[in-house]
Structures are given as C-alpha cells and as structure tokens.
Image (cartoon, helix red, strand yellow):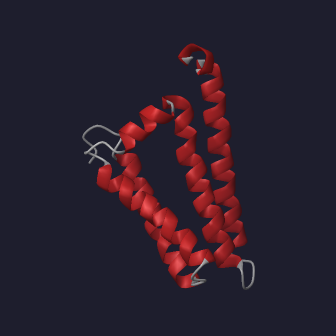
Amino acid sequence: VIDATSLGWGTRVKGFVACFAIGYLCSLLGSCLLWVPKKGLMLFAVFYTLGNIASIGSTLFLMGPMKQLKRMFEPTRLIATIVMLLCLILTLCSAFWWRKEGLALLFCILQFFALAWYSISFIPFAR
C-alpha cells in the first residue's frame, strides 16, 4: 500500500512548487486587494491567510503528511506551531465572524511573525 500511494521525487517537487506558487499568488493578490474600498482589509486577511496555508501545505509534498505533522509538533517547535496555527485561525475569525478589520490586520501581522518563527524552528541552532 505504501509503495502504491507514494509519489516519486519529481512529482513531489512539482507539487511543492505548484502549491508554493499558489500560496505566493494568494498572498500577492491579498496585498493588491488591500486597497479595495470597504472590503479590502477583509479580503487581504483572507487571501494572505490562504496563501500562508498553501505555502505550509507545499512542504507536505516534500516530507509527506505524517512526517510533516510529527515534525510540526516536536517539543522544540511545539510553541511556534501552536502560535502560528492560532494566528491563522484568529485572522479568519476576525475577518468572517467578528468582522473587525483592525483586529484582522493585527492578526495578519502576528501571523507573519509567527510563520517566520515557525520557519526558523526548522533551521538547526537558529532558535
């Protein structure tokens, strides 16, 4: 079963590049939509968050889903993972349910720093 469902290295790299590119484009689109009157900040928060989720999802192609989840929740990066996921969720909550644009912008800023902290946790001795 494992051999039949595993992807080849070339397919994994293509999936990574495609997913990362989609994430980058969503984040870029969100930045462009920031200047739309009235709903711009909400659209920015949504597309920026979706872009970050797609970028994180791109690494699933390189490592595989189970290995990625195990590495995300290792004790050395547990706090960074929780803060990052919490910022992603709170950004979407503030945009959709609470409809607080200022709070959505704050969580987008925190999301940026949380994602940077999470990414740095994968570099040995960078913490």
Q: Residue at x 64, y 36 (%)?
A: 17
Q: Is residue 12 above or below residue 119?
A: above
Q: Quadrant of the N terminus?
A: top right
- Which residue extends farthest right? 36
Q: Is residue 92 above or below residue 66?
A: below
Q: Residue at x 45, y 65 (%)?
A: 87
**Residue 28 position by quadrant:** bottom right
**Residue 99 position by quadrant:** bottom right
Side (left or right) of 112 relative to 29: left
Q: Residue at x 63, y 50 (%)?
A: 23
Residue 73 placement (x, y as % from top left): 34, 45
Side (left or right) of 4 relative to 127: right
Residue 114 placement (x, y as % from top left): 40, 60
Q: Is residue 13 above or below residue 74?
A: above
Q: Residue at x 57, y 47 (%)?
A: 55
Side (left or right) of 57 relative to 37: left
**Residue 19 position by quadrant:** top right
Residue 38 placement (x, y as % from top left): 72, 85
